[in-house]
Image (spheres, rainbow, N blue to C red):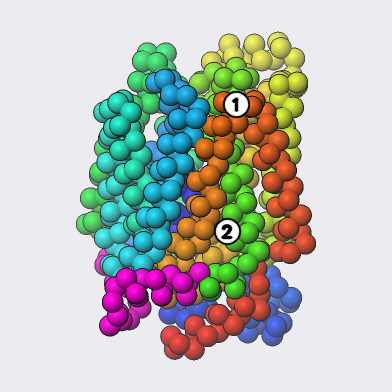
Amino acid sequence: MQEKSERLGKDTKASESIGVTTTGNSQSPIQGLGVGDVEMERTGVSDALAAIFSWKNYRVYLVTAWVFSAAITINSFFNLYFRAIGWDYTSIGAVVSITTTVSIMMRIMGGYVGDTVDRKYLAVLAMALGAVYFLLIGMFTEPWMVILALLVYASIDIAKGGSSAYILDNMPKEHSGFGLALFNAGRALGVVTLIFVNLLLPIYGFPDVFRIMSMAGGISLVICSVLRGVYLDNCPPKGERKNEVLWRDFLAENWRTIRVIAGVLPGAIIIISLDAFSDALFNFGALLYANEYLGVSISGISIMLSIILIVSVPLTLKVGRLSDRWGIRKVSLVIYSVMPLCMALLVIAPIYPTWAPQSWIDSANSFIDGLGVIYTTVFVAIVLKRVNDSLWWLVISVMIQKLLPHKDTAKFLAAFWYIVYIFMSIGPLVGGIIFTYVNQPTLFVLAFIINIIILISIYSKGLVNYEAATTTTTTTTEQTS
């Protein structure tokens, strides 16, 4: 349920072309892919920051996105909150799958909306719907109100594609990895949320703390919605309006979009869809497994999540720069090689629950309640997995930014994530059934097998059809020049 790959950046000197370059090997015209002998521009971090922050809309969008990142951190506890208010595993899985299905429908409609409506208004709407979701979760505990809140959250996807495209379209390719990484870096502000969670737990208990933090998040996002409405510049759609029946234009445009994606990113579509299913299994079960099966306290989970956020920020910035220089395939292979290891550690965690003497664990817990979790096997597994997930989705975002035409960015984002969400929507229901009728470690065995298949596929087939990408970008450049 987490908002993945939506924190994006922009620069003043945006090009209307798709950014085809002819430096280096003439067979590799796409800048930033690291194919053949392409020469990568090695500007310093200070120069990249100056270029990215030269546009005031980027600053406003970035700050409000960071606030959203801090607020959304509380959603990491959502399945645990469901359990705390009396829901069973199958009910949790079914509700999450239903709301993800709603996200699918909203996402594909959002692609068309994002390329036909002023994207400033979509950026405001996305933030406002997030505010409504948090306020509903904070105020109500009745199942039907909780479901309503989740449906509101799923509805964000109708504005998400256009909201992301608002920033994504005009970011210069030479700084795109670093610019996208800055949005992910804002996730570190989630540590503030987690600190308050640990401070309030002894006073109010977990369910009340979850609702208090949700209310605080909702109020913060109301303020961010106002800021976006006041300070962001308008961004009318770039494409020409067509004199066609609306529904026919909608279907034709989305079919064209899917064909382009399937041509340019055939390996990526298959691999990322499988990874989305694997991620959905992991996200459903990992913290429930840690808390209920392995006995990790809520305080320990909060510390675990804090460390994930702190560690992921410098790595995200580094990977953002490397993806601009090394190329997509090499970076993705390095990152994904860790995923099967994480699943294997979760499987063996009941057998080898800790990797340090008990005296170390007791000493850590006496210093800060829950700190002893750092000496557990499940801590290593979940931290490695969550950090690498952040890096993986950053690489995917950079890949989309570099390869797909900018004229219809919202539709490309929508169609891409529509395909991914189909597989993601299945995971929670499957996870709930496994947790209820089989046993919890089995879920991670299944995820391990999927991760191995994905790793082999990345190594043997890669993610990108470079010939199709070259043809697509060159054609788009000719059409927009």
Lateral position of residue 441 relative to residue 477, left or right: right
Q: Any magenta on residue 137?
A: no
Q: Position of residue 289 (x, y in %)?
A: 59, 26
Image position of 259 with respect to 326: above or below? below
Q: Position of residue 419 (x, y in %)?
A: 52, 58
Q: Is residue 67 left or right of residue 456?
A: left
Q: Amino acid at mark 1?
A: Tyr
Q: Quadrant of the C terminus?
A: bottom left
Part of the protein shown in magenta? 232-258
Residue at mark 1: 437
Image location of residue 138, percent across then percent down: 30, 29
Q: Quadrant of residue 466?
A: bottom right
Q: Is residue 459 above or below residue 314?
A: below
Residue 51 appearing in the image:
no
Q: Residues within 10 Å of mark 1 (few under 14, many from 20)?
A: few
Residue assigned mark 2: 396
Q: Visible in this render: residue 237? A: yes
350 relative to 471 in the view: left or right: right
Q: Which mark is residue 174?
A: none
Task: Give SS at disc 2.
Answer: helix
> Measuring 44% from the left and 46% from the top, which residue is drawn there?
100
Which residue is drawn at the image coordinates 53% and 74% (left, top)?
A: 260
Label 2: few (<14), some (14–19) or many (≥20) C-alpha neighbours in 10 Å: some
The residue at the point 42 percent across, 36 percent down is: 95
Question: Please, what is the three-letter code of the amino acid marked with disc 2?
Answer: Ile
Determine the secondary structure under disc 1.
helix
* Camera-nearest residue between 328 and 227: 328
The mark closer to the camera, 2 or 1, is: 1
